Amino acid sequence: MQSNPIQTETVQASGAITAHRAITFAGAQATVQGEKVQGVSRTAAEDGKNVAIDTMGTTIIETGAAISNGDSLIVDGQGRAIPTTGNLAVGAGATAVTSTAANGSILTGADLPEFVFADAKGAAAGAGELIKIKLR
């Protein structure tokens, strides 16, 4: 069985950071549900201080809701892990596309509205628990 090494980086905190919370590419604790993040803080940090964040492998994060083992995870508005709100789908009332010319070109643009950053490797009954996750 292949091991899953943890990759850690050090970033300068942009604002106060709580331990075991998701960190954005700007070095700030995540504040927008579903936003793109680069990793999870190992410890708390004051604004301007260096903080170690796990960016690959498994790590521990605080939960913001109940989570089941294997759930795909996004962040909530406090940088905690929550289950994704749903799968991609064609919106209600949208026109089905059957053209082979459009195949592969239907979804264009930037990032999806929810950035799935990890998978749960344990369960939580609700907010405020610490669980193990596998970063994507």
Image (cartoon, rainbow, N blue to C red):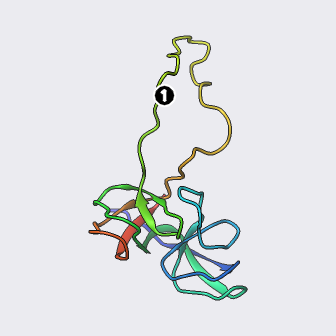
Q: Nearer the viewer, residue 31 or 23?
A: 31
Neighbor class of circle 1 (other Cα within 10 Å; few <14, some 14-19, many 20+) is few
Q: For the residue marked with disc 1, what is the amino acid?
A: Val
- Using the image, determine if residue 104 lies above or below residue 45: above
What count of labels does the image hold? 1
How far across and how far down the image is residue 44, in percent?
Answer: 55, 86
Classify residue 13 as left or right of residue 5. Answer: right
Classify residue 128 as left or right of residue 92. Answer: left
Classify residue 128 as left or right of residue 95. Answer: left
How far across and how far down the image is residue 39, in percent?
Answer: 56, 68
> Which residue appears at 57% of the width and 76% of the height?
53
How far across and how far down the image is residue 49, in percent?
Answer: 69, 88
- Residue sticking out furthest to the front: 93
* Dot 1: element: loop
State the quadrant of the N terminus: bottom left
> Which residue appears at 60% of the width and 65% of the height?
38
Give the residue pinned by disc 1: 90
> Which residue appears at 26% of the width and 68% of the height?
125
How far across and how far down the image is residue 32, in percent?
Answer: 58, 61
Query: Looking at the rendering, which quadrant does residue 27 occupy?
Result: bottom right
